[in-house]
Amino acid sequence: MSKLNRLTKNLYLLFTLSAVGFVGLLLGIITDNKAWQIIALLILGVTIIVFIGALIQNHRENRVIFRLQRAVKNLNLQTQAKPVLVRPDDEYKGLADEINELASAKDDEYQKSLAETTEIEKIINVLPVGVMVVDQAKDVIFANSQMEDILERQIKPEPHPYTLDIANYELLTMIDSVYSDHQSTRTEISEVSNDPKTIDVQVVYNRIKNSFHLVVIAYDISEVINIKQMQIDFLRNASHELKTPVTAISGFAKTLLDGAKDDPESLTEFLKIIDQQSDQLTSLINDVLTISHIQNHESNAAEPLLLRAFVDQEFKTQSNQIKAQNIQVENLIDEEFQVKIDSASLRRIVRNLISNAVKYNRPSGTISIDASRQGSFWYLNVKDTGIGISQKDLARIFERFYRSDESRNKQEVPGTGLGLSIVKELVDSLSGKITVRSQRGVGTTFTVRLPYID
């Protein structure tokens, strides 16, 4: 309003000065009065100067108004507004200061909200669950990296239909149901992606004022289910393995008590069988206890040892079994080769690998062991010329109680079925890796890679 009043006054002043100047100039020309003419020209000059000054002032005011309008617009758009700078004597100084204070307060609030949002996104991104937010328009507006891993596809950051990311029919049906019923739901879904997985999925309906969105929370429980299945398999297999020696011991003991003890030949034969089955039972119990110790992370401190002498000692420990098979052993490890490791764990590894090489070797076969260092790792190779392992069995030989169909059915090879499983868990506990190469009728090579500790 003040600007309109000032503009009106300026127009009146310009009109008045112009009228006076033109009238004075006209009278001076008519009367041929030079003084009137000069005065009139001066008045017109002053009028022009006032007009130019008014234009400049109006331009300055328009610039200030434009900056104020832009600042207010930025506030409405929730974007950062630059401060409006005006002269101390400008009539808009108070208004500019108020807008600047409001912009500063809103910018602080925006930065705080942005920091909180960023922090929340960081937390969501490190959660072990997949999170996807779908708005009312059925567009994905957020998804963390875990959801990408579960769906096995890259999710675009810009809004897009959720059907572009989700291919599983059951999950799509869940989301559509929540959109229709406005009720949260939860279930387990299999095969969400190309790989077989079991996912615990919860679709949460969340209303905010006049709109709503869905939060899809997915957690891969495949490992949990696998562990449960492994526990069931372990109990079933352990019961099966325990049943055989216990049944044999109990049966032959009852036979002896029923009168077979009076026959010297039967007595000796049955007692040998009971002794063998007792050893089998003891071996199984020791293997189970070993697995328990490994899982409880019970290990000793690493100590330096000469590997060749260490392996020779293990060959001597199993010399009776080696001689019974007439097997030739070759220790190809350099005498000065030294490693630093938990000796108890390494002893179980080497003992089980040598025992395995003896059991599955052919008569008059060969076992050779060598070792080498490559960078920050050292490698132990145990090679035999035995019956080998079929390709269908290679992927499962480290499973607990697993034996090939041939050895399980015919019981050609004695053992608990836990030896290689123990080796695998011991190697894993030492931050190592074990691999196997084998060919039926040719032989098998186990390679253990372990960190080299200076």
Image (cartoon, helix red, strand yellow):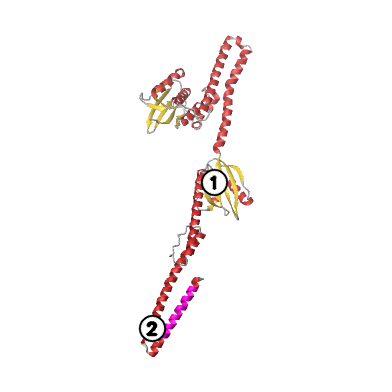
Helix, strand or loop at label 2? It is: helix
Q: Would you call the spot at circle 1 few (<14 residues within 10 Å), some (14-19), or many (20 or more)? A: many
Q: CA distance from mark 1 to mark 2?
A: 84 Å
Marks 1 and 2 in Cβ contact (< 8 Å):
no
Residue 15 colored in magenta in the image: yes
Going by the image, does 296 lie left or right of 307? right
Viewer-proximal residue among 307 and 303: 303
- Whole-percent x and y of residue 243? 59, 23
- Whole-percent x and y of residue 245? 57, 20
How many labels, in total? 2
Q: At 41% from the left edge and 83% from the top edge, which residue is drawn? A: 21
| In the depicted structure, whether residue 442 falls above or below residue 65 | above
The three-letter code of the residue at mark 1 reads Val
Q: What secondary structure characterizes most of the magenta part?
A: helix
Quadrant where the C terminus sits is top left
Q: At 55% from the left edge and 38% from the top edge, which residue is drawn? A: 222
Tag in front: 1 or 2: 2
Q: At 49% from the left edge and 75% from the top edge, which residue is drawn? A: 8
Q: Which residues are magenta?
A: 5-25
Viewer-proximal residue among 75 and 280: 75
Q: Which mark is residue 39?
A: 2
Helix, strand or loop at label 1? It is: strand
Q: Which mark is residue 131?
A: 1
